Amino acid sequence: MDSFVRPCYQVEKHEGYTVVKLEASLDFTNCKVFETQVEEISSNVYVVVNCDSLPELPKDWLRCLLKMHLNTKRDNKFLKLIHVNGMLQSCLKREGIDTTFRVAKDLRDALQETGLAPKRTLDTEFINPFLTATVHVLKVQAQIEATAGQIYMKKPREVMTGDISGVIGIISDTFDGSVVISFPEKTFLKVISSMLGEEYTKIDQEIVDGAGELTNMIFGQAKIVLNEKGYGIKTAIPSVISGKDHSLSALTKGPVVVVPFTTPHGKFFVEICLSQ
């Protein structure tokens, strides 16, 4: 019986273009499978090959990429490599094909001339995973029922204040943004007391990290849902701001959506911002 072979590449199909992500462990068995898919992957679409963390390309994989390159050229499209590091660039030069493949910085840069670069907006598809994740995390981790209120667009000079806030950046190849989860002291103390199973009466260093953990869990769950839809959001580390009635500015310039929540122990809110 053949042993299971873990795929060392991923293919993401989008309208008008396909992204192929290659991993560092490019083996011959996977290459033979990939070779059978070359025509289908590269037929009449632009192809972007993500080489993130890839130190080199074995000769059999180079042969497949060259075939894809010719296929796209035949269809008046192109194949571009992105996230090419110095080691891979040296490998291509050593093989004498460093000028064969077109190289771009990231996906946005690769698709810029095609007009296909994905544009992300603050619509329900993007907002709802954060709303659902917030309700779920509070219920599971703190046994607290949170209810979302009316979502609205934050006004340019509107100031939202809180006593403790978790902040995390949204980073991808095609857009960026931020998420802020901010609590008044009373609400946060009830949430963290329920989470940790101990009564807390003030915000101190012992529980400050709890806001970061909540933010990380909510962001992590929303990220899974969004990445299944092709958003390509990367892992990020949250930071925590504490201080009575502090206010925060978005990490990027763009529209900001506010989602207010109520609980039996008080209110809190989530802000989501995407770059324009």
Image (cartoon, rainbow, N blue to C red):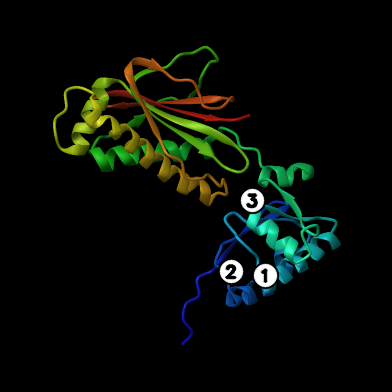
Side (left or right) of 150 relative to 190: right
The answer, for residue 112, to whether it is visible in the render is yes
Q: Amino acid at mark 3?
A: His
Q: Identify the residue under disc 2.
A: 26
Quadrant of the image occupied by residue 205? top left
The answer, for residue 264, to whether it is visible in the render is no
Q: Which mark is residue 83?
A: 3
Side (left or right) of 147 relative to 48: left
Q: Find the distance from the CA under tag 2 to the CA under tag 1.
A: 8 Å
Q: Nearer the viewer, residue 186 or 262?
A: 186
> How many discs mark residues in the rendered view?
3
Q: Amino acid at mark 1?
A: Trp
Residue in view at x 49 percent, y 13 percent? 158
Q: Position of residue 70 (x, y in %)?
A: 81, 65
Tell me whether circle 2 and circle 3 mark residues in contact (CB < 8 Å): no
Q: Which mark is residue 61?
A: 1
